[in-house]
Amino acid sequence: MSSSSPTLATASAAVDFINASPSAFHAVATTRETLLGAGFVELAEGEVWTLETGGKYFVTRNQSAVMAFAVGGGYTPGAGFTMLGAHTDSPCLKVKPISHKASEGLLTVGVEVYGGPILHSWFDRDLGLAGRVVVRKADGSLGSHLVRVHRPLLRVPTLAIHLDRKVNSGFSFNAETELLPVLGSAFQLAFATDDAPAGAAATSDTEFEVSLGHSTVLLDVLLEALAAEDGCAGLARDAIVDFDLVMYDVQDGTLGGAQNEFIFASQLDNLMMSFCGLRGLLGSLDSLADDTNVRLVALFDNEEVGSQSEHGANSNLLQRLVERIIHGLAEAAAAAGSPDVQLSSLYDRTIRKSFFVSADMAHAAHPNYRSKHPDTSRPAMNKGPVIKYNARERYATTGVSAAILKEVAARADVPLQAFACRNDIPCGSTIGPMTSAHLGVRTVDMGNPQLSMHSAREMCGSRDPALAIALFEAYFTHFAAIDATLHESFPAAAASS
């Protein structure tokens, strides 16, 4: 594959998005900048909206979830929504609300395990710190600011093999006491120079300075990172009120493999599908004037911990947004002189003409663990997106919803694969089933195939991002027309005797 090919250019753009998004907050900030650059209007949930056909809008919640939508030029009240959802969060280590710990003259940071990471992959990595910090400014106001410390700040060291001779036959550890990233040294703090006298005694663990339950070393690092933010220069430690901070691998994502056929990066699950979904929406806008539907991309937070939050897929966020758009556009139509719309049934009529693509990364068949995959379902990287099926409704795909996506793929000339878990291996889940249930909308679960899912460092195919984007562009462009050709019917009733 040529290093200058459009396919690799798309893969490189995906890597850039991931590298700029070490936390859910940064993923939303990066998405927000892209949407503003594409002419989308930012709305606030707490304000009155004025919507119109042909308009492009977005709204954020909690700084970690974003919903973008574009109204077709031919939209009329009661028409459908062409929707796609993904999520901004990934499994990681999160700083505890009281994080100060110390032992053996070393300063460590208490962490909580967020989601279901492969924890051994977090050992011996150079970790940075990212998220948001709430500060009290000089005028007494509270400000929520994004922060990123993009350097090797922390490290979880493994125990030497000489002290654990069985480590290669089974690496085990206590996640509370042995998964502590090292932040600093008491010796260095005591002398604050690089040429401290040899043999000098280190400060005892109890002499580390603590404020607000955190080491002042950590707080000073945050203040330094915040100094360039508006109103944050010169703040004291006690100006930090609280924060949401996660650790991440500071090694940038990159193209890899013999012919750059892979992407090696963190957070592919699920920033890759967030990127592709957004690109698919933006790439479809040339045909927006001819569409009768509303096109919508929803990037939720907290999928990795069950989505049970005000900004997760298991909240009212998407349903309330859809209802608000429906009624806002109905009001605009009425103001323009359209006949009265029957508001009582508007949502139900709309949702029956709507569709939702749940886009979350999928499992590629592993060359070293062939027995973990069914013989009949072995997705491969660089061979196209994967439709995900599960008889226990862990995925929301049905025969009808899969058929619609297959028709979209045929129009875009994008190959599709299929995935189902073995019966003897439990299946993960996505935002698909809960979104389908909350909205009452037809849903298909799909995603690009990858390896090392939930590791601190994952891999996927470099050809697949361009294929997913082409699929999503076609989905936003053609769904309304495809859906108009779909007829679900029952067999003719037998004549009564």
Image (cartoon, rainbow, N blue to C red):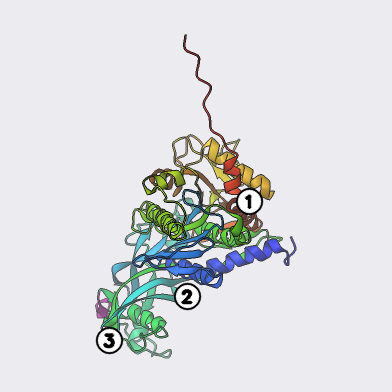
Disc 3 residue type (three-letter): Asp
Q: Which residue is mark 1?
A: 381
Q: Along the line of sight, which residue is nearer the eye, 212 or 411?
A: 411
Disc 1 residue type (three-letter): Met
Q: Are marks 1 and 2 in contact (CB under 8 Å)?
A: no
Q: Is residue 210 magenta?
A: yes
Q: Which residue is mark 2?
A: 152
Q: Is residue 172 above or below residue 371?
A: below
SS for callout 3: loop
Q: Nearer the viewer, mark 1 or mark 3?
A: 3
Disc 2 residue type (three-letter): Pro
Q: Is residue 379 magenta?
A: no
Q: Which residue is mark 3?
A: 139
SS for callout 1: loop
For the magenta stretch, what is the residue range?
Answer: 205-212
Q: Along the line of sight, which residue is nearer the eye, 219 or 491?
A: 491
As measured in the structure, the alpha-carbon distance from the residue carrying label 1 to the one carrying label 2 is 31 Å
Q: Is residue 18 above or below residue 438?
A: below
Q: How many discs appear?
A: 3
Q: Are marks 1 and 3 in contact (CB under 8 Å)?
A: no
Instruction: Name the mark on residue 116.
Output: none
Q: Along the line of sight, which residue is nearer the eye, 375 or 204?
A: 375
Of marks 1 and 3, which one's residue comes earlier in the chain?
A: 3
